[in-house]
Amino acid sequence: MDAESGAAQEVLRRVFGYDSFRGDQREIVDHVVAGGDALVLMPTGGGKSLCYQVPALVRPGVGVVISPLIALMQNQVDALSALGVRAGFLNSTQFPDERRTVEAQFVAGELDLLYLAPERLRLESTAQLFDRGKVGLFAIDEAHCVSQWGHDFRPDYLALSMLHERWPDVPRIALTATATAKTSDEIVQRLDLGSARRFVASFDRPNIQYRIEPKNKPDRQLLEFIRTEHAGDAGIVYCLSRNSVEKTAAFLTENGVSAVPYHAGLDNRTRAENQTRFLREDGLVVVATIAFGMGIDKPDVRFVAHLDLPKSVEGYYQETGRAGRDGQPSTAWMVYGLNDVVQQRKMIDSSEGDAAHRRQLQLHLDAMLGLCETVSCRRVQLLNYFGQHDQQPCGNCDTCLTPAESWDGTVPAQKLLSTVLRLKRERGQSFGAGHIIEILLGKKNPKVLQHDHHELTVFGIGTDLRDLEWRGVVRQLLAGGLLAVHGDYGVLTLTEASNEVLFEGRQVLLRRERERPTKPARTAKS
Ligand code: ADP
Ligand code: ZN
């Protein structure tokens, strides 16, 4: 062991109280201590922090950590101070005199680590500050935020390219838990990390059981899931809107599950209080929008539940990754339905940005839908997405435990698509899924009568399937690109591929909708 490696080991033991490095940590640390640049792709909970904290303590000068997690800086600094590490932070929530104190400490070399909000990089005074002190390394946390088409873009991150230009001798380490080849290529390009060494950890989280079920009565399904499998456990429930966060938290509480809401609309005090309670108390459930969780280090989160579809597989992976950091069995559970597809599509249609941007959002959504509708192992699909190929079925996700039944849905698909086609051709009309299904089922409701839709030849041709099954057909056709949905009203329209089904005999295999999903034989808590 050379001297520097020995120094790193000694810091790990003395300061952090750990006996050994994990996975790639030792190699990463040695590389950065020696002055090399690094790109670290490691899943949440993998131990990224030590990869820059240890080198910051070993190398002369201050380790500057650029992080978008402003709300957590105080916590991080407190936690490091408790270990005897000299740490400070600079962000816009501080009073000027606090900031000046930290700056003076930095210049005097009295800090080991300085956490910096990305927006401070735009200030020339920050660059001058760096020049007055000595920077030992730059750590760029959540580096995927530089990716313009990623799910978490922060414009301030673009300014990070100047670090290398102005301080070419200071090593940089970029870290992220988002690791598609595309994202990491973009990080390399934008941050000029072409000659950096890449460290890619496995993205498998074997202790997490992945499950995705058809959405029916989400609140009830959630309650049932918690009661039967995770009573008294700490968990995170993600919802899309603040309103459903509030409602769900209230519903759980009424039904004897202690739960608190968390979203950006709550005042700072309540939010901080709920977050602290979640970290400190046992068995509390936090119901949250995705505003919650980045950087939260609670080891014993036993489940992450999604009541709404995440926008991307990256988001899904990151959010579910908050379960089971302690390595104990945990569940990633989600319900998903037709409305999720309609709603996401609506959000994409109304999103700001150009056509290329919307296209990108659609690709993210398509990948997420692919994961939902897969009939093979969820874990294999997930790891494939992150570039880990040739995986074996895991035996512990819902599709492995209760293999999905598929059925030939070609005829129903043709019925549905031809209804959409006829309305368009014969009447010049487009309607949403609900109405189309009513026509197929032959329901003479007011809307059908008002439009004379009971006179269409397709009226009532779909009574062999039930409403729930039809919704499954629509959802799966949308997910497979055999049908499209648009605009505020979620009207259905045909795609190129629809024609293949209608006119070219393309077969459509669908996955059978279970009224009530059978609970996997082997659950996470066995
Ligand atoms: P990430 O930032 O990758 O999500 P963290 O750096 O927060 O992960 O580390 C996750 C958890 O693992 C933390 O509780 C951390 O203290 C612990 N940990 C990291 N490295 C080691 C190690 N070498 N030995 C023991 N525990 C570790
Ligand atoms: Zn599996």
Image (cartoon, grey):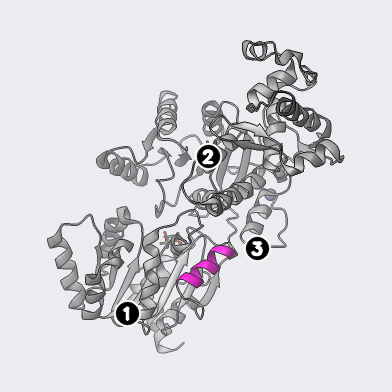
In the foreground, 242 or 348: 348
Ligand 1 falls in quadrant: bottom left
Residue positioned most to the bottom? 2
Q: Is residue 448 left or right of residue 10?
A: right
Residue 144's disc is: none
Q: Secondary structure at mark 2?
A: strand
- Whether label 2 lies within 8 Å of ligand 2 gets the answer no
Instruction: Please name the residue that numbered disc 3 is placed on.
Output: 388
Cα distance in 3D space between marks 3 and 1: 34 Å
Instruction: List x then y, in percent, for residue 153.
Output: 44, 57
Q: Earlier in the sequence, mark 3 or mark 1?
A: 1
In the foreground, 433 or 252: 433
Q: Earlier in the sequence, mark 2 or mark 1?
A: 1
The vertical placement of 86 against 68, above or below, is: below
Q: Is residue 187 magenta?
A: yes
Q: What span is colored magenta in the figure?
A: 182-190
Please say whether residue 227 is visible from this viewpoint: yes
Cα distance in 3D space between marks 2 and 1: 41 Å
Residue at x 44%, y 31% (from the top left corner): 244
Amino acid beneath label 1: Gly
Residue 306's disc is: 2
Mark 1, Cα crowd under 10 Å, few <14 / some 14-19 / many 20+, is many
Q: Secondary structure at mark 3?
A: loop
Q: Quadrant of the C terminus?
A: top right
Residue positioned most to the right? 505
Q: Is residue 481 magenta?
A: no
Q: Secondary structure at mark 1?
A: strand
- Whether label 3 lies within 8 Å of ligand 2 gets the answer no
Instruction: Please name the residue that numbered disc 1 is placed on.
Output: 136
- Discs 2, 1 touching: Cβ within 8 Å: no
Instruction: List x then y, in percent, for residue 269.
Output: 25, 41
